[in-house]
Image: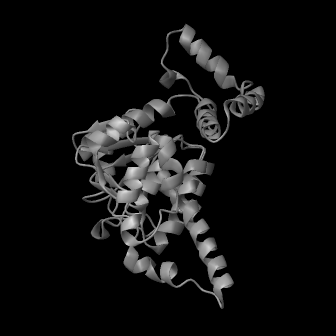
Amino acid sequence: MAAAVIRSAFSKSQGLWLPGLSAVRAMSAQAGPTPPFSTLSVSRPTEAVTHVELHRPEKRNAMNRAFWSEMVDCFSQIALDSECRVVIVSGAGKIFTAGIDLMDMAGDLLQPEGDDVARIAWNARRLVAKYQETFSVIEKCPKPVVVAVHGACVGGGVDLITACDIRLCTQDAWFQVKEVDIGLAADVGTLQRLPKVIGSRSLVNELALTARKMYSDEAKSSGLVSRVFPDKEAMIAGALELAGEIAARSPVAVQGTKINLIYSRDHSVAEGLDYMATWNMSMLQTQDLMKSAQAALEKKSPKDVPFSKL
């Protein structure tokens, strides 16, 4: 059911590669969640770009029970969608996300099922692993994911954005690893991914242990985000332009690059090189290589090359 709905939403293309103002406005003013989703709005602002918007603006996009499973369903379908080459993630309303919806999730977090300590612990571990997959599915998706953050990005929001490939934000954005303030250690990705995103173990420790806010200027200087925009509309336009540049390249090259970047992050240089050699012994046989070389010789843009779907 979800697959059919996503394909239907994706079929409403508005253009190729470069976004028009109508596409930017459409992304900034979605009518509501895309059924059967209740927390996500899924659209296709341009032919090869999929937009996934967190859509609970009345709840500041807080992450309720439905969100944790809907993200997995959505990105699992995107991973298989040959029409999609790049994904943009953003939030509806005044902020990106307030993080976990404590009121909705309290039962799962505070009262896991089980007849004794062992069974309660077993079920609690299973539950945490399930929630971890909500953001790991973004990282596992072979399509590059650009996240655009405005306003607050709290708690689970940091878990989400660190699983994305490229992070953008507005000048009024701020980030907070909030979990210690509510009595727990962040357990769905921040403590594992943030140190590899910004590189400074000292800064990561400070943010995670104090729950202090990091504002856009510090986020840019530390490497958490790569660009800062004056407002949300400018950011969405920038995200669309960036996504268009990525989508114009060979999907074999782009998806292979993402997969190998993530593999190399988690392995030694020698292991990464060996994996890359194994990867390219087949991927170098793609027609995209000759098409790209021919376009370069003819001084054409990659956007003029008709790459096959992947």
Position of the C terminus, as image quadrant, is: top right
The x and y percentages for residue 265 are 60, 38
Q: Which image quarter is the N terminus in?
A: bottom right
Q: Which residue is pictured at 41% across the width and 79% down the height? A: 104
Total of numbered circles in the picture? Answer: 0
Q: Is residue 87 left or right of residue 264?
A: left
In this rendering, is residue 99 above or below 50?
A: below
Percent x, y of residue 47: 47, 40
Residue 44 appears in the picture as rendered: no
Between 284 and 193, which is closer to the camera in this rendering? 193
Place of residue 211 in the rendered image (x, y in percent of width and height, measured from the top left): 34, 59
In the foreground, 233 or 174: 174
Q: Is residue 255 depicted above or below 155 in this figure?
A: above
User: Does residue 254 appear anywhere in the picture?
Assistant: yes
Give percent across and percent down for residue 20. 31, 37
The answer to which image quadrant residue 241 occupies is top left
Residue at 48%, 72% in the rendered image: 66
Give the quadrant of residue 259. top right
The residue sitting at the top extreme is 297
Colouring convention used in this rendered image of the protein: one colour
Q: Is residue 301 above or below residue 28?
A: above
Q: Residue at x 34, y 67 (%)?
A: 56
